[in-house]
């Protein structure tokens, strides 16, 4: 377990090495519809805070994610696509990294398995055999894996809405062909950690304690008639970067069985990381 915890720093370094940077735009606490919109859609706060429960009732869905990150004048976008089992709190994604800022190297897509307690990564980086996985405990990550892995866990993103403090109903729109209600507000990470389900509480508590320089997370969420998240955009402020995470959910009820790697398939050695300047260092045990 000690080796796994020490790899956390290597994972963060890998994310920084490909330039995890993003666009964070300010969110108003009130929508243009004001109170009239809230009356038509019911209480906005209740609707938003119950979004995670609605996803669990839905069972599963396909998902697309993107992380837009900005730091020091550099911007990149990391994209992911996969399926998520909300009842089992597990997902499988293919994450595509941008080219290295200092060169033209293409990165192989990283396969990620997201679970309530851990992040598994294959094609993780130099030094890891092609048939091995890297495992990291999410509660050991300073941000609870809301941004580190390059794809925000869809359930964790929805659980964060349990900490909503300011929210307004914006209006009705369409997302992916579905009629949705658009809400805009700010969620408190500490409040979300206290209200989160048991599987997500530890990671959100870690994020609340040390992950972000701003504990309030501005968001725009689009809920369908069943209260399910169809689109969620959240904006995080880290010490040296702004991060905008967008999650799209669709095709609810699809098969989403996710099998975790066996112990013998998990890499326990050292991981070589590519640095922004093109050099390499070694992280791990």
Image: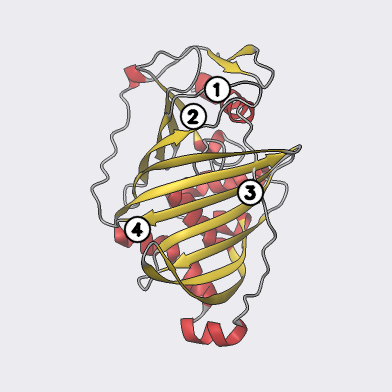
Q: SS class of the residue under badge 4?
A: helix
Q: Is residue 225 left or right of residue 167?
A: left
Q: Is residue 64 above or below residue 164?
A: above
**C-alpha separation, residue under disc 3 versus residue under disc 2:** 19 Å
- Residue 188 occupies quadrant: bottom right
Q: Residue at x 34, y 21 (%)?
A: 263
* Place of residue 230 in the rendered image (x, y in percent of width and height, measured from the top left): 42, 61
Quickly name the residue at label 2. Answer: 136
Which mark sits nearer the N-terminus, 4 or 1? 1
Label whose residue precedes the other's in the sequence (4 or 3): 4
* SS type, badge 1: helix
Q: Which mark is residue 56?
A: 4
Mark 3 or mark 2: name the one nearer the start of the chain.
2
Rendered location of residue 239, percent (x, y): 74, 41
Q: Position of residue 279 (x, y in %)?
A: 65, 12
Q: Quadrant of residue 70?
A: top right
Reading the image, the residue beneath label 1 is: 7
Q: CA distance from mark 1 to mark 3?
A: 21 Å
Could you tell me if the residues under marks 4 and 1 are in contact, i.e. CB atoms within 8 Å? no
- Name the mark on residue 208: 3
Q: Residue 148, can we see it?
A: yes
Image coords of residue 186 (percent x, y): 63, 64
Distance from label 2 to label 1 (Cα)? 7 Å
Identify the mark nearer the N-term, 2 or 4: 4
Q: Up-down: is 127 above or below 106?
A: above
> Residue, x 62% and y 36% (percent of image)?
20
Tell me the element at label 3. Answer: helix
Colour setup of the view: secondary structure
Q: Are marks 2 and 1 in contact (CB under 8 Å)?
A: yes
How far apart are labels 4 and 3 at the CA level?
Answer: 23 Å
Considering depth in this image, is 98 or 186 the residue closer to the camera? 98
Which of marks 1 and 2 precedes in the sequence? 1
């Amino acid at each position: 377990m000690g080796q796994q915890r020490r790899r956390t720093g290597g994972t963060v370094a890998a994310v920084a090495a490909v330039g995890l940077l993003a666009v964070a735009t300010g969110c108003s606490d009130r929508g243009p519809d004001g109170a009239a919109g809230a009356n038509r859609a019911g209480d906005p706060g209740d609707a938003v805070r119950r979004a995670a429960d609605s996803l669990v009732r839905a069972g599963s869905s396909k998902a697309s994610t993107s992380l837009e990150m900005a730091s020091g004048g550099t911007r990149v976008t990391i994209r992911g696509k996969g399926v998520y089992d909300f009842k089992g709190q597990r997902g499988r994604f293919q994450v595509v990294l941008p080219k290295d800022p200092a060169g033209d190297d293409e990165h192989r897509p990283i396969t990620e398995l997201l679970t309530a307690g851990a992040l598994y990564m294959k094609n993780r980086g130099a030094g890891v055999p092609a048939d091995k996985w890297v495992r990291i405990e999410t509660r050991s990550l300073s941000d609870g894996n809301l941004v580190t892995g390059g794809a925000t866990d869809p359930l964790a993103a929805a659980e964060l809405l349990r900490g909503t403090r300011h929210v307004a109903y914006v209006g009705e729109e369409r997302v992916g062909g579905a009629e949705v209600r658009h809400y805009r507000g700010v969620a408190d990470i500490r409040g979300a950690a206290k209200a989160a389900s048991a599987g997500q509480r530890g990671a959100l508590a870690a994020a609340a304690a040390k992950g972000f320089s701003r504990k309030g997370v501005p968001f725009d969420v689009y809920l369908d008639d069943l209260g399910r998240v169809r689109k969620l955009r959240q904006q995080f402020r880290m010490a040296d970067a702004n991060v905008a995470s967008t999650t799209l959910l669709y095709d609810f009820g699809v098969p989403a069985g996710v099998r975790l790697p066996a112990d013998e398939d998990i890499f326990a050695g050292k991981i070589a990381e590519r640095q922004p300047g093109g050099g390499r260092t070694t992280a791990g045990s």
